[in-house]
Image (spheres, rainbow, N blue to C red):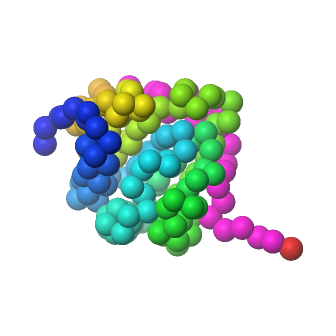
Amino acid sequence: MTDSLITSRTEFHAALRDAFAEAATAGSRELWLVDNDFADWPLGERDVVGLLSEWVASSRRMTLLANNFDDVARRHPRWVVWRRQWAHVVSCRANTELEAGEVPTLLIASGAVTVRLSDPAHYRGRVSHDKAEELRCQELIDAVLQRSEEAFPATSTGL
């Protein structure tokens, strides 16, 4: 598995799909997905939801961290349905203190692969299998996570 650069939206989406497949194959215990709003992620694609279904099992954990989740239900309905079934292992957290451009765009499949956009506006980034890069990205997440709160409940209750 080689590291590669991301230079377009198409390459970013392909990198995310490949990372989900690698997480499933490698049995990554934890997935971290971080973005301003996940509006431009392929989360709702049938194949991606299928890969997540392969990945999820006992002792797995997924955390999504965003500025807001306003577009997720509308743009990714398959993922929302999948998430309801797996709400016990999927946590959604929001950090509303940060401006839109301050939230990093990255995916970490622990022990396997990291996908990071350093320039989300122009889809410039990197796919890495380096443990040091995973740790650097985890530090970015930790800083944002410390000031976050639970968000986007799996189900909504009404009166």
- Position of 120 with respect to 158 (left or right) is left
Q: Is residue 89 visible?
A: no
Residue 142 screen position, x and y as percent = 52, 31
Q: Quadrant of the N terminus?
A: top left
From what the image shows, is residue 101 above or below residue 108? above
In the picture shown, does residue 117 fall above or below 39? above
Residue 155 appears in which quarter of the rendering?
bottom right
Left or right: residue 48 versus residue 140 is left
- Residue at image coords 55%, 26%: 102
Q: Is residue 144 magenta?
A: yes
> Which residue occupies the foreground of this view, 155 or 122?
122
Q: Which stretch did the figure color magenta? A: 136-158
Q: Position of residue 127 (x, y in %)?
A: 25, 36
**Can you name the residue that lies furthest to the right here?**
159
Q: Is residue 4 left or right of residue 39?
A: left
- Per the image, is 146 magenta? yes
Does the image show residue 1?
A: yes
Of residues 145 and 18, the one nearer the viewer is 18
Q: How many marks?
A: 0
Q: Does 114 sit above or below residue 152?
A: above
Quadrant in which residue 60 is drawn: bottom left
Q: Position of residue 121 (x, y in %)?
A: 42, 31
- Whether 64 is drawn above or below 27: the answer is above
Q: Residue at x 62, y 64 (%)?
A: 154
* Residue beneath the point at 46% across and 27% down: 139
- Residue at x 51%, y 59% (from the top left corner): 75
Q: Position of residue 128 (x, y in %)?
A: 24, 34
Q: Quadrant of residue 114?
A: top left
